[in-house]
Image (cartoon, rainbow, N blue to C red):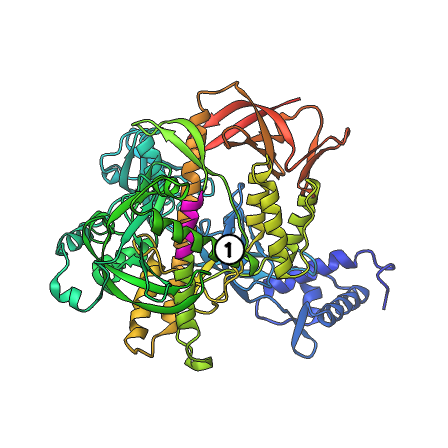
């Protein structure tokens, strides 16, 4: 047999042979048939073909269904995965199996698949070491069929131009499907059909959102873009309106009565729904009884009702810069379930007896009725903590002492304290931002947070510690995994640039070290950057029935029990808790796991929508400041530019690499930097730079900066 050196054409021949076998499909061919297809007639060439086939078979590229007959081994591989579109119209399919590599699909082989769709792909395993390619054979599940964008009306037809940069097809809208939309208006369009050989899908206008650039239009567009409905269906509003107000004597008899106990709520000054209240009373043994009372949403929202189905689909309330899109209709969220002062209200409560060292000596869970004596804002509660005379001062002061002890104990156990500066906008009556400020969390916020964490933790423990193995009671937990060591290592290297050393040998050491860092950087210019990077290096918390612990809080058991007005998982937790309190044993754990997965997905969508609304307001705030100069910090680097966060107002924009003209800059991913090829000038994450506002695109929510030398 000739060696590879003696036969320089073998590599080319191998590729030609693989092409022949690919075309032959399921028909296996011998070396003579392959040679004939290639028009090779002399014996030397035929022998070389036989050699190549044997080598390819030995290396696992081919297999022999019968001796001497060859077939491409991976010809009929089908993979299911998610479409990740690129700007040029091609896509990578990310397989559902984590250990498989992405599959490249050329534009003509996408077969009408869109970004995010779950598809079945036919994979061509061409040659060892080469990127896998394939074509879409079936669209299993559309990620979305509704898109926001602009109507372009031309004579006898209309096209819809989507906002979504990953949606690369304009949508054809027949004139009778415009539903009143005018040229240039922003609308929500739903794809209704996509004929087999048509380049563009066909759609109908579902909602006219309004004039481009207007606050209301853009906020509704953000909601619609992330799949949140713009209003409640009439059937849901009707169901809410039929629920009788007031609390009946019969209902009170079935509950533990706290109406005679000192009870109050502490919430933001502008809050409309109050879903948690605290009660406080001294016990004869010198201890304290503290009630954490949560609105009893599950009393009003029953399984499989119209209200329940809608709440499940939404999964959560959405908090945009200028509005709240509630999970439940206003009749429930702001009225029936809201723990307003001087009204009898139905609750689900966690009640604890505590000593002076914040040790729990007794616990009770169940349905209650309360009567809040007072509604306080965080600012009012903070003034009392700081010494202002008030009728509730003894209760607030003692609760603050106990909360501080709970907090200290949590941090000693390894909980991590991430204090980010929350950016807020001052808006005029039309929603236009006039200024930016940061909201600082004080003791009053932490007091409420600590007692809510306590209730969440103890409810999870109460159920989680019952039964073992197969007898464990299925429940909804809020699970937070330990951080990925690689990501954490990168963050640790980066923190070192600011002179902060982290110890990441064990999970406990990491937590302790991160806490020390967070304390050290408080008030420093790098606080926001390092905190957000640290949070990014953490795993994401999810809802699940399968795992119980929360790394960031250092709790072995944790759930969400305290916000059922705005989070559907809390409603599920209330129902399950009552079911087990009533002696229930069996539930379908897999059914609840699927519900938990949906809740996690909706929570992520809500967070993305909230971020998009902040980006829009930042762009709007800077839109009339073109040419203004600011000091900023490099907050991110990519292959096309670097992100800079303005120190003064926390608005973030981009300096594009093509606009930095003193050198040719390239990305150094490992060191979070961009580096000039000739002069080696480096811009790294955390560097302070001077910038000028260059351009603002409100529609794309993008801000461009010019770098000042």
Assess whether residue 448 is covered by the magenta stretch.
yes
**Dominant SS in magenta:** helix
Q: Residue furthest top?
A: 627
Under circle 1, the secondary element is loop
Q: Residue at x 45, y 64 (%)?
A: 359
Comparing 374 with 617, the one in front is: 374
| Position of 177 relative to 704 (above/below) | below
- Image x and y of residue 518, in percent: 58, 46
443 to the left or right of 261: right
Assess whether residue 439 is covered by the magenta stretch.
no
Looking at the rendering, the stretch of residues picked out in magenta corresponds to: 442-452
| Position of 296 relative to 702 (above/below) | below
Q: Quadrant of the C terminus?
A: top right
Would residue 551 be seen by someone viewing this image from the given angle?
Answer: yes
Q: Residue at x 32, y 68 (%)?
A: 365
> Which image quadrant is residue 211 in?
top left
> Which image quadrant is residue 376 in?
top left
240 to the left or right of 229: left
- Image x and y of residue 304, in percent: 24, 64
**Residue corresponding to mark 1:** 540
- Image x and y of residue 38, in percent: 69, 60
- Number of marks drawn: 1
Q: Quadrant of the N terminus?
A: bottom right
Q: Residues within 10 Å of mark 1 (few under 14, many from 20)?
A: some
- Image x and y of residue 516, in percent: 62, 49
Comparing 512 with 652, the one in front is: 512
Would residue 150 be seen by someone viewing this image from the given angle?
Answer: no
| Position of 245 relative to 628 (above/below) | below
């Amino acid at each position: 047999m000739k060696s590879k050196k003696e036969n320089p054409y073998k590599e080319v021949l191998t590729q030609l042979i693989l092409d022949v076998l690919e075309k032959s499909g399921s028909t296996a061919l011998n070396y003579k048939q392959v040679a004939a297809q290639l028009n090779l007639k002399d014996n030397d060439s035929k022998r070389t073909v036989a050699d190549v086939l044997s080598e390819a078979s030995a290396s696992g590229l081919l297999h022999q269904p019968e001796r001497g007959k060859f077939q491409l081994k991976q010809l009929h591989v089908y993979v299911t995965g998610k479409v990740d579109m690129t700007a040029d119209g091609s896509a990578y399919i990310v397989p559902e199996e984590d250990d498989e590599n992405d599959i490249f699909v050329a534009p003509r082989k996408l077969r009408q698949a869109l970004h995010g769709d779950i598809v079945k792909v036919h994979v061509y395993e061409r040659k060892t070491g080469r990127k896998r390619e394939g074509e879409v054979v079936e669209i299993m599940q559309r990620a979305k069929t509704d898109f926001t964008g602009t109507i372009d009306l031309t004579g006898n037809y209309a096209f819809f131009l989507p906002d979504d940069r990953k949606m690369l097809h304009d949508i054809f809208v027949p004139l009778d499907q415009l539903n009143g939309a005018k040229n240039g208006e922003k609308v929500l369009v739903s794809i209704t059909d996509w004929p087999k050989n048509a380049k563009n899908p066909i759609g109908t206008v579902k909602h006219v959102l309004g004039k481009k650039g207007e606050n209301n239009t853009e906020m509704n567009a953000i909601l619609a873009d992330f799949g949140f409905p713009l209003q409640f269906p009439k059937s849901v509003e009707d169901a809410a309106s039929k629920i009788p107000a007031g609390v009946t004597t019969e209902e009170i008899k079935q509950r533990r009565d706290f109406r005679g106990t000192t009870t109050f709520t502490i919430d933001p000054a502008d809050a409309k729904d109050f879903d948690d209240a605290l009660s406080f009373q001294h016990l004869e043994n010198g201890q304290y009884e503290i009630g954490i009372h949560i609105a009893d949403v599950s009393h009003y929202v029953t399984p499989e009702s119209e209200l329940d189905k809608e709440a499940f689909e939404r999964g959560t309330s959405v908090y945009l810069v200028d509005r709240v899109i509630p999970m439940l209709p206003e009749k429930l969220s702001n009225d029936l379930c809201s723990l307003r002062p001087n009204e009898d209200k139905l609750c689900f409560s966690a009640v604890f007896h505590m000593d002076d060292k914040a040790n729990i000596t007794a616990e009770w869970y169940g349905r209650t009725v309360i009567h809040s004596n007072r509604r306080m804002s965080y600012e009012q509660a903070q003034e009392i903590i700081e010494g202002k005379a008030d009728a509730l001062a003894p209760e607030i002061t003692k609760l603050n002492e106990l909360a501080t002890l709970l907090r200290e104990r949590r941090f000693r156990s390894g909980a991590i304290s991430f204090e980010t500066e929350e950016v807020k906008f001052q808006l005029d009556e039309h929603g236009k931002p006039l200024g930016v400020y940061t909201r600082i969390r004080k003791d009053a916020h932490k007091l409420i947070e600590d007692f809510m964490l306590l209730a969440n933790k103890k409810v999870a423990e109460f159920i989680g510690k019952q039964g073992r193995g197969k007898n464990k009671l299925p429940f909804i937990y809020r699970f937070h995994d330990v951080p990925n060591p690689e990501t954490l290592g990168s963050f640790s290297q980066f923190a070192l640039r600011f002179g902060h050393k982290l110890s990441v040998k064990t999970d406990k050491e990491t937590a302790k070290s991160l806490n020390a860092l967070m304390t050290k950087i408080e008030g420093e210019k790098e606080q926001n950057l390092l905190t957000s990077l640290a949070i990014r290096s953490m795993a994401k918390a999810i809802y699940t029935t399968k795992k119980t612990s929360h790394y960031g809080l250092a709790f072995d058991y944790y759930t969400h029990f305290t916000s059922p007005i705005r989070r559907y998982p809390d409603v599920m937790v209330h129902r399950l808790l009552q079911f087990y309190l009533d002696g229930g044993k069996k539930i379908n754990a897999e059914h609840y796991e699927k519900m938990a997965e949906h809740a996690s997905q909706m929570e992520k969508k809500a967070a993305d929508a909230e971020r998009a609304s902040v980006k829009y307001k930042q762009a709007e705030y800077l839109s009339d400041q073109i040419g203004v100069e600011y000091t900023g910090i490099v907050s991110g680097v990519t292959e096309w530019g670097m992100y800079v966060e303005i120190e003064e107002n926390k608005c973030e924009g981009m300096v594009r690499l093509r606009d930095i003209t003193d050198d040719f800059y390239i990305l150094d991913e490992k060191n979070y930097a961009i580096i000039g090829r000739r002069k080696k000038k480096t811009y790294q994450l955390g560097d302070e730079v001077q910038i000028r506002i260059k351009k603002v695109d409100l529609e794309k929510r993008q801000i461009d900066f010019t770098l000042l030398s």
